[in-house]
Image: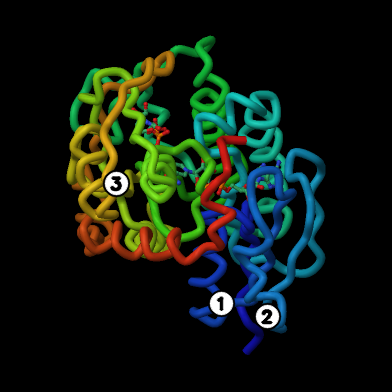
Amino acid sequence: MAKKRVLITGAAGFLGSHLCDRFIKEGYHVIGMDNLITGNLKNIEHLFPLENFEFYNHDVSKFVHVAGDLDYILHFASPASPIDYLKIPIQTLKVGSLGTHNLLGLARAKKARMLIASTSEVYGDPLVHPQTEDYWGNVNPIGPRGVYDEAKRFQEAITMAYHTYHQVETRIVRIFNTYGPRMRLNDGRVLPAFIGQALRGEDLTSFGDGTQTRSFCYVSDLVEGIYRLLMSDYAYPVNIGNPVEITINDFAQEIIKLTGSNVKITFKPLPTDDPKQRKPDITKAKELLGWEPKVSREEGLKITYDYFKSLPKEDWDVLPK
Ligand code: NAD
Ligand code: UDP
């Protein structure tokens, strides 16, 4: 029987590359697509020799053409870290809106099932805690983060519209802060920022008073949740994340302990509209998908730290792009 074929956008990025690995492992023919705006081919270079992997260097905000059949499309292309989407705000809006529209059109033409990578940012600075899927969110549409949050909210809206009006099979995952190997040390997200600082012997920069919270999910747990959601028959949004919540200051202390660095925590201004608390309610994922995270923060951080430490030393010196 012919192999099932999956298109993964954002394939050269952090999550996209791990998804490519998973679908290759499951025996699929994987077509990776990326314009490398925040990604790196190094994340997928090990797949290039495989005959069941192809790569298209393409901006999905422009018309997308893929030869042959497609069974699944996973749309993960988008700048994802605050410093990335603040630097390239228009591309961020376009990939969430035009890019999603192009890919939904492709899904409709190919009769493929499409899963979109939505985000906990659709809840904005949430007034409901922990966040359940039926919470509509508290987003500032014209604030600096609005370019990402509103693109993702539009992405969900157009995906539901294609589902309702064109009967495209769609899935929506709302991803909460995820970490692991292949993140960029200079992408500005808190985990690579802290580990990079610790490796360079610099103090860790906690923004605001550091009492804001996040809940960190290890990448293999996220990939498993996404795989199960794709294979399910549920078209409404599902939170996937690790509900164990921690303040940024406590997280900094954990990184200092893990790295054994002789550094302190210093404080910098809180970015505009930075959410004060974030923790997924994962009841739906548990009930519908039988999914819950398995990797503890201690375990996941150790693997991630070992990965960053193994990178060439000159890569530790990068300042945020
Ligand atoms: P990433 O920056 O590592 O990967 C994104 C990839 O998309 C990059 O390789 C980039 O080059 C590519 N890309 C961006 N615009 C493109 C375009 N127009 N055409 C083709 N390729 C394009 O980020 P990530 O953490 O892997 O995030 C992947 C997806 O998951 C994003 O959609 C993001 O919004 C979503 N997400 C991630 C997290 C997380 O914690 N990592 C949380 C919520 C949502
Ligand atoms: N943060 C921090 N120091 C840094 C980078 C980030 O204190 O060097 C904070 C940031 O203000 C936010 C939290 O860490 O409160 C998570 O930030 P990240 O950019 O990783 O993700 P997001 O805000 O999108 O959850």
How crowded pointer 1 is (Cα within 10 Å; few <14, some 14-19, many 20+) is rated as: some
Q: Residue at x 34, y 35 (%)?
A: 204
Q: Nearer the viewer, residue 276 or 260?
A: 260
- Identify the image quadrant of the N terminus: bottom right
Q: Amino acid at mark 2?
A: Asn
Question: Splitting the image into 4 quarters, where does residue 3 fall?
Answer: bottom right
* Mark 2 residue's CB less than 8 Å from ligand 1: no
Numbered badge on residue 52: 2
Q: Say if mark 2 contacts mark 3, CB within 8 Å.
A: no
Q: Residue at x 21, y 47 (%)?
A: 254
Residue 195: percent from left, percent from top = 38, 48
Image check: 47 left or right of 308?
right
Q: Is residue 243 above or below residue 8?
A: above
Mark 3, secondary structure of its residue: loop
Between tags 3 and 1, which lies in front? Answer: 3
Q: Is residue 22 above or below residue 78?
A: below
What residue is shown with label 1? 24
Q: Residue at x 53, y 10 (%)?
A: 142
Question: Splitting the image into 4 quarters, where does residue 44 fall?
Answer: bottom right
Q: Earlier in the sequence, mark 3 or mark 1?
A: 1
Residue 13: percent from left, percent from top = 59, 53
Mark 1, secondary structure of its residue: helix
What residue is shown with label 3? 216
Q: Say if mark 1 contacts mark 2, CB within 8 Å.
A: yes
Q: Nearer the viewer, residue 273 or 222?
A: 273
Q: Amino acid at mark 3?
A: Phe
Q: Earlier in the sequence, mark 1 or mark 2?
A: 1
Image check: 170 left or right of 257?
right
